[in-house]
């Protein structure tokens, strides 16, 4: 999957491919990097070329705030698909009535069922991407019209996960 990571005016294309035996093939600007990442509490501990950096992320994709090695900043992270379609913007698409996958990943847990009433901020679903679990929450009060995925499903960024009425 190709990601575009924008830090200020600088944009870096990053290609990430899951390897069959585990791990990742990561290339930034076409240069192969040795990368590994694990969840460490509320942070993500990332080893890049032997250097370990703990990263705290805040906010929904595509625009996130981060703290890494004491440096605070903002980044915009998009995929080719989200960039071209403009559909995976935030936690849920209110005008379309669907909760969308903000990134490609695997559905870990469903926290609601068809017919459930949810309030603003209620957790709906957990999706795992790049070894991090992301809880998607309701951005408005609604009734769950349909759950369109099952635990274990793999989804693309922008995929419809839950229909809200």
Image (tube, helix red, strand yellow):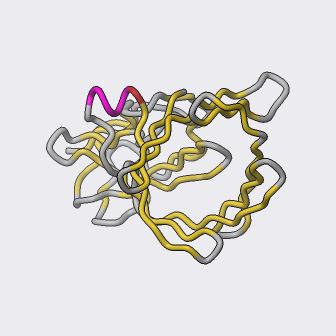
Considering only vertical position in the picture, is 62 above or below 56?
above
Does residue 7 appear to the left or right of 91 in the view shown? right
Q: Nearer the viewer, residue 39 or 155?
A: 39
Image quadrant in which the C terminus is located: top left
Farthest bottom residue in view: 70
User: Where in the figure is residue 2, as x and y percent of width and height?
Assistant: 51, 29
> Residue drawn at (27%, 35%), measured in percent from left and top?
87
> Residue drawn at (73%, 33%), measured in percent from left and top?
24
Farthest left residue in view: 95
User: Where in the figure is residue 57, as x and y percent of width and height?
Assistant: 52, 63
Query: How many numbered badges does the structure rendering display?
Result: 0
> Residue drawn at (43%, 54%), measured in percent from left and top?
7
Does residue 158 appear to the left or right of 127 in the view shown? left
- Residue 36 lies in the magenta-colored region: no
- Residue 83 lies in the magenta-colored region: yes
Q: Nearer the viewer, residue 69 or 134?
A: 69
Q: Quadrant of residue 17?
A: top right
Magenta segment, prevailing SS (helix, strand or loop)? helix
Farthest top residue in view: 20
Q: Quadrant of residue 113?
A: top left
Considering only vertical position in the picture, is 77 above or below 87?
below
User: Where in the figure is residue 37, as x and y percent of width and height?
Assistant: 73, 50
Does residue 111 appear to the left or right of 164 in the view shown? right
From which residue to which does the magenta span run?
81-85
């Amino acid at each position: 999957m190709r990601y575009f990571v924008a830090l200020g005016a600088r944009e870096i294309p990053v290609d990430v491919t899951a390897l069959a035996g585990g791990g990742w093939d990561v290339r930034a600007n076409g240069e192969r990097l040795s990368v590994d990442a694990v969840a460490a509490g509320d942070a993500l501990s990332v080893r890049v070329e032997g250097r370990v950096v703990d990263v705290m992320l805040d906010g929904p994709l595509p625009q996130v705030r981060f703290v890494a090695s004491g440096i605070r900043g903002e980044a915009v992270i998009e995929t080719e698909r989200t960039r071209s379609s403009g559909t995976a913007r935030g936690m849920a698409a209110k005008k379309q009535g669907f909760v969308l996958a903000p990134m490609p990943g695997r559905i870990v847990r469903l926290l609601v069922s068809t017919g459930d009433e949810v309030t603003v901020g209620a957790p709906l679903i957990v999706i795992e991407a790049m070894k991090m679990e992301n809880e998607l929450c309701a951005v408005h009060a609604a009734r769950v019209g349909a759950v369109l995925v099952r635990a274990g499903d793999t989804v693309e960024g922008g995929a419809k996960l839950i229909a809200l009425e």
